Amino acid sequence: MMLHLGCGKRYIQGFIHVDLADWPHIDYRNSVDDLSMFEDSSADLIYSSHVFEYFDRQKAPSVLAEWRRVLISGGILRLAVPDFQALVQVYAESGDLNKILGPLFGRIMVESGDSEIQHIYHRTVYDYFSLKSMLEENGFIDIRKYNWRKTLHKDYDDYSQAYYPHMEKEKGLLISLNLEAKKG
C-alpha cells in the first residue's frame, strides 16, 4: 500500500490519496496527521510533498509518529519541504524577497465540506540538517536526499520539482528539500 498524503489536486495512480480538500480522487478526506483509518504497519511507502511544513515543530513529532505507525518495518517515508538553505541562496542572488515569499510562508485555501474556506500557512522551515535530525529523533533511519527523477511519481509535477527560476529543471536551483527515510 502506498499513501499520498496532502495530495491536493494531484492524483498518482496506485496511491491512496488523503487530503482535507474535496477533489474527486481523494480516497480519505481527512487531516494527514490522523491516519486512524489505516492499520499499524500497513503502508510500504508514504509520500508527502510540501505538507509537513504546515505543522509546527511542536506538532511535527506526533505527525511523524502517526506516519511511522502506519509504515511497515523498513517502509519508506518520502518527504518534500521547502529548502530553507536554497531559499536563502535565491534571496542572496536576487535581492528580491517576493521570489521566496510563497515557498517560505505558503498559503493555501482549503474548502471544507460545509463550503467554509480556510487559509493555512507554513508554520516552520527546514534545512537538510534540521529535517534529518527531526527524522532521526523520531525513529527513522537511512535518511538521504532523493532524486525526484528516479521516483514512482516523477511524471506528476508537484512542489518536489520546484526550481528557481521557475520551471528551469535542467539549469535552475532546486528549492525543494527532498528526503527519504526508512522506518527503523
Image (cartoon, rainbow, N blue to C red):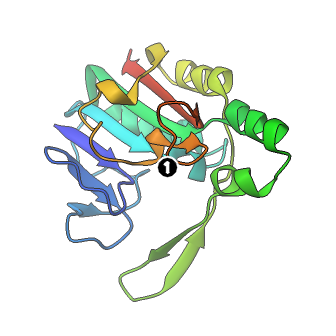
Viewer-closest of 6 and 97 = 97
Residue 56 visible at all: yes
Q: Position of residue 39 (x, y in %)?
A: 21, 41
- Of 91 and 112, which appears nearest the observer? 91
Q: Residue at x 60, y 27 (%)?
A: 131
Q: Is residue 21 left or right of residue 101?
A: left
If the image is split into quadrants, where does the C terminus sit? top left
Q: Does residue 145 sit above or below 110 in this rendering?
A: above
At a point 34% along the width and 38% down the height, the residue shown is 47
User: Residue 54 location in percent, x, y?
Assistant: 58, 53
Vertical position of residue 110 compared to residue 117: above or below: above
Q: Please identify the residue farthest to the top as the structure is shown.
A: 142
Q: Residue lying at the far bottom in this picture: please name it.
A: 115
User: Is residue 70 visible in this depiction of the protein?
Assistant: no
Q: Crowding at label 1, few (<14), some or many (≥20) Cα neighbours within 10 Å?
A: many
Q: How many marks?
A: 1
Q: Nearer the viewer, residue 137 or 96?
A: 96
Residue matched to label 1: 51
Residue shown at the point (49%, 49%) measured from the top left: 51
Give the answer, above or below, for where 54 lies relative to 143.
Answer: below
Helix or strand or loop: what does disc 1 sit on? loop
Give the image quarter of residue 82: top right
- Identified by mark 1, the residue type is Val
**In the drawing, does residue 90 fall left or right of residue 154?**
right
Give the quarter of the image for residue 111. Answer: bottom left
Q: Position of residue 138 (x, y in %)?
A: 52, 25
Which quadrant, please, contains the N terminus?
A: top left
The residue located at (36%, 20%) in the rendering is 183
- The answer to whether 184 appears left or right of 135 in the picture is left
